Image (cartoon, helix red, strand yellow):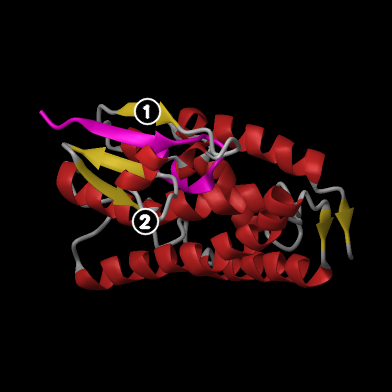
Amino acid sequence: MSRVVLYGADISPPVRTCLLTLKALNIPFEYKFVDIVAREHFSEEFIKKNPQHTVPLLEDNGKYIWDSHAICSYLVDKYGQNDKLYPKDLYQRAIVNQRLYFDASILYMALRNVVLPMWRENSNFVPKDKIMNILECYNLTETFLENRQYIAGDSLTIADFGCLATVSSLNGIIELDKEKYPKTLEWIERLSKLPYYEEGNGKGLREYVAILKSRLTEFEM
């Protein structure tokens, strides 16, 4: 039987994306905590496994994969009992891939651009351009959810897990306006009812948002 190990920390949105996927697929796995605040991901041992020194990192029978989007698509292709979370139909898969790239290049970068100065420079300030960037992310997410239940269509996919983990984290910086983003808030509420949501995203999200709110205290509006 495969030995699956996930290295990460619950506060990380990409790690939470993988936790949601692992739990949705009901894959037995070992979870190894990596203290990213203490920079354990820069240890010599960790870098041997992942030269990019990022979490999440997946180990499957001695083989290593990093980047949450690559990990989640791999998990569904290898361990999924069906392709619902990552469709094999080429068009549907392309839509899911687009949303995964949206998460990686738009949503997560908006989050990273705010939190990187917080971690590296102990900055408590969020400038207006970064606030506008987050709001643009919300506008696009709302557009993607128009006339559909999920981020890539009418069925739950791994794109929902990735975008959910990031958008719910951005919400800890700039709160989603109920009047402007009703579809996004309905989507978050819908996904929060998944039986594995609390372990996959809820617990780590609360911890992460508490950190953000305690350290980001000045906003240029």
Q: Nearer the viewer, residue 30 or 194?
A: 30
Q: Is residue 220 visible?
A: yes
Task: Please determine whether, in this image, residue 7 is positioned above or below residue 106.
Answer: above
- Residue at the spot of label 1: 31
Rounded to the nearest angstrom, the CA distance separating label 1 from label 2 is: 18 Å
Q: Nearer the viewer, residue 164 or 179?
A: 164
Q: Residue 121: x and y, percent?
A: 75, 53
- Magenta region, residue range: 1-20
Q: Give the amino acid at mark 1.
A: Tyr
Q: Residue 191: x and y, percent?
A: 50, 42
The structure residue drawn at horizontal position 36% and vertical position 56%, both measured from the top left corner, is: 69
Q: Does 36 sit left or right of 80 as displayed?
A: right
| Image-quadrant location for residue 117 | bottom right
The structure residue drawn at horizontal position 57% and vertical position 29%, both measured from the top left corner, is: 203
Q: Does 171 sit left or right of 79 as displayed?
A: right
Disc nearest the viewer among 1 and 2:
1
Q: Residues within 10 Å of mark 2 (few under 14, many from 20)?
A: many
Q: Nearer the viewer, residue 107 or 122?
A: 122
Q: Residue 20: x and y, percent?
A: 41, 39
- Residue at the spot of label 2: 69
Q: Does 48 sit left or right of 151 as displayed?
A: left
Tell me, yes or no, whether the highlighted magenta stretch contains residue 2.
Answer: yes
Q: Does 5 sit left or right of 159 as displayed?
A: left
Quarter in which the N terminus is drawn:
top left
The structure residue drawn at horizontal position 39% and vertical position 41%, both measured from the top left corner, is: 44
The structure residue drawn at horizontal position 76% and vertical position 56%, both measured from the top left corner, is: 177
Q: Residues within 10 Å of mark 1 (few under 14, many from 20)?
A: some
Q: Give the amino acid at mark 2.
A: His
Task: Please determine whether, in this image, residue 23 is positioned above or below residue 175.
Answer: above
